[in-house]
Amino acid sequence: MYGFSGAPAFDPANYFDIRENTYAGYVMGDFDVQTDIGGFDGQAGVRVIRAESDLGYNTLQQDWEASELTTSRTDALPSAVIRYKPRPDVIARLAYGKTIGRPGFAQLNPAMVLNPATSTGATFGYAASGNPDLDPVEAQTLDLSLEWYFSKSSSIFGTLFWRDVDGFITNVNRSIQVSDRTPELNGNYVLTTPENAGKGKLNGAELGFQWFPDRLPNVLKGFGVQANYTWIDSESRDPVYGNPDDTTEVTGTRNSRVAGVSDWAYSVTLAYERYGVSSRLSWVDRGKFLTGYNYCCSMPSETYSSGEASMDLQLAYDINPNFTVTFDATNLTNEIYRTYYGDSRLFNQDSQLYSRTFALGLRYRL
């Protein structure tokens, strides 16, 4: 289509291969006990996972050299949940678990993408790469919740949660100089790469409800509302480097927010479910949050997003039991997303407008 012929030339800077084998097994038990004060039931068990990974990539010494990194680890992940029902419409839950979150493929890929400076007078460009040495994120979790189902399709709930997390993955910016590429690409860059941070916590509370009124006039039956609010107290002990351009020399730690986590978030959804129609008009909003660290230039070291909000619409209509037509729209209010360094009044990073999208679809059920 574009007039190219044959395979593209091999680029050693972009070579990356990963092979991973995982082996898992679990044992689980259920229990159910009825007492004079209500019923208790739940589950307890443990899942054991072994992961063996082989990464192949190229590193630049005097010339490009093939590098390999072989890792393996075994994790035992216990979990337990106890449910208490003092009455048929009230449920209390206590849940504990240990979890891990493995880095994504792109986060492990060490290939470096270079975007050289294009504006007049700019002295550096921007680069991005993954990190093959990333470890999984580990977490110990505890949840306590209370739910009241005051009608067949309506409920109120509240949850307290505690998370002890080790190895948060956050983006770090640092200055680098590239001299091994073409003259057009060589130069100074700000490199963004993911790093494992230290231990931290995510503690908070969530309140929410779902209400589909039963006593509406017939023409309005099927309308309802869903809403929830979450508050989070987050803290991460992140490494401090003696030389910001060299992240192998850790001289201490500092307490900061957890990257990607806002102090608060909420959503409100208007819904309709009847006569084959399923619809949702949703508004979601969250407060500012840390996006990563900047070890370049004269800007403050912490980078933030001022928050994110969006109004979205989902519509679906069952033409018959087999066919459903759908319509989806996102960012109806054209929200602008802004990031900044340290102080939002002084150090703007960028402002982005994500386009509104509209999608029409048809589903067929066999």
Image: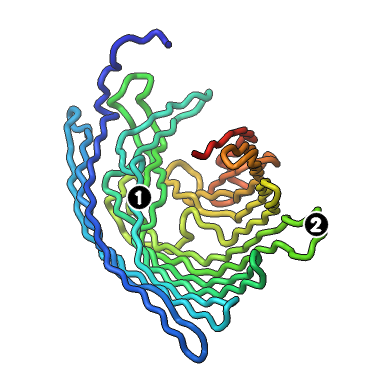
- Location of the N terminus by quadrant is top left
In the rendered image, the vertical position of residue 150 relative to residue 253, given as above or below? below
Q: Is residue 240 visible?
A: no
The residue at 60%/55% (across/down) is 286
Residue 37 vs 117, above or below: the answer is below
Q: Residues within 10 Å of mark 1 (few under 14, many from 20)?
A: many
x%, y% of residue 79? 35, 70
Q: As drawn, is 131 to the left or to the right of 23?
A: right
Q: Tag 1's secondary structure?
A: strand
Mark 2 surroundings: few (<14), some (14-19) or many (≥20) residues within 10 A = few
Amino acid carrying mark 2 in the image: Asn
Question: Which is nearer the eye, 260 or 299?
Answer: 260
Residue 166: assigned label: none
* Front disc: 1 or 2: 2
Q: Amino acid at mark 1?
A: Glu
Q: Secondary structure at mark 2?
A: helix
- Residue at the disc numbered 2: 218
Res 57 seen here: yes
Could you say where residue 192 lies in the image, as x and y percent from the top left? 40, 41
The quarter of the displayed image where residue 262 is located: bottom right
- Rendered image quadrant of residue 77: bottom left
Q: Measured along the vertical axis of the image, is residue 319 above or below residue 49?
A: above
Seen from the viewer's position, the closer of residues 323 and 11 is 323
Which residue is at 66% across, 70% downward?
151
- Of residue 222 and residue 20, the one placed in the foreground of this image is 222
x, y percent for residue 316: 64, 42
- C-alpha separation, residue under disc 1 versus residue under disc 2: 57 Å
Residue 22 percent location from the top left of the image: 23, 51
- The residue that label 1 is drawn on is 195
